[in-house]
Amino acid sequence: MAGNAQENRERSSSSRRKGESMKFTDVRKLVRLVESSGIHELEFEKDGTRIRVRKADPVPVAATYTVAAPAPQMAAPAAPPTPATDNPAPSPPPAVEAPPKQYSEIKSPMVGTFYRSPAPDAEPYVQVGDMVRPGQTLCIVEAMKLMNEIESDMAGVIKEILVENADPVEFGQVMFRIDPQG
């Protein structure tokens, strides 16, 4: 009798270990199924465990940035000289360079690591001066070990690549400037 109880415990323990690895394999298969299909959400239940896999809502990848030219200003009358003091006036902060008004920006839709090519030894997806079309892959942003291809949503010419390969990017950080008029 004691031998049968020991065998049952070993079988039960062995089947639990197999079930756990099968659950991980099942989850991996479900994630791949949702990623590669047109479905938005999938719920699966097996052996009392329920798993829901849902695609993230799409985030706009690019936004158009328009800068209006500053209005001409009349010169102000000269201010009377002020006496010298020990504390000089603070210098104004450096001006942030605005993109030319005809360029559109491709921004990072997430926090992650920017990669210009699909593999370290591969050619970059795009270079400055390349013509791109809507849906063309521009780069990869790796987030939590998932490689996310970032695609262009417009046709145009790459004018600037603002991030170096393997550098971290923040949500909303400008990665590319594209001239839609080519």
Image (cartoon, rainbow, N blue to C red):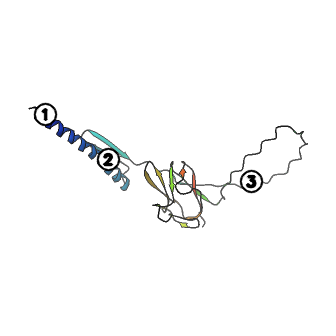
Which quadrant holds the C terminus? bottom right
Pointer 1: residues within 10 angstroms few (<14), some, or many (20+)?
few
Pointer 2: residues within 10 angstroms few (<14), some, or many (20+)?
some
Pointer 3: residues within 10 angstroms few (<14), some, or many (20+)?
few
> Furthest residue to the top?
2
Q: Which mark is residue 94?
A: none
Q: What whole-number distance in Å separates the C-alpha atoms at marks 1 and 2? A: 33 Å
Q: Earlier in the sequence, mark 2 or mark 3?
A: 2
Whether pointer 1 and pointer 2 mark residues with C-beta atoms closer than 8 Å, the reply is: no
- Assign a secondary structure to mark 2: helix
Q: Which mark is residue 5?
A: 1
Which quadrant holds the N terminus? top left
Q: Please report the residue visible at 10 percent of the width from the left and 35 percent of the height from the top.
A: 4
Q: How many marks?
A: 3
Left/right of residue 73 with respect to residue 164 in the rendered view: right
Relative image position of residue 103 (x, y in whole percent): 62, 60
Relative image position of residue 79 (x, y in whole percent): 89, 44
Placement of 93 over or under 72, stated as above or below? above
Q: Pointer 3: what residue?
A: 70
Q: Nearer the viewer, mark 3 or mark 1?
A: 1
Residue type, numbered disc 1: Ala
Q: Nearer the viewer, mark 2 or mark 3?
A: 2
Q: Earlier in the sequence, mark 3 or mark 1?
A: 1
Closer-to-camera residue (122/126): 122
Residue type, numbered disc 2: Val
Residue type, numbered disc 3: Pro
Q: What whole-number distance in Å separates the C-alpha atoms at marks 3 and 1? A: 86 Å
- Assign a secondary structure to mark 1: helix
Q: What whole-number distance in Å separates the C-alpha atoms at marks 2 and 3? A: 56 Å
Left/right of residue 148 with respect to residue 106 in the rendered view: left
Q: Which mark is residue 27?
A: 2
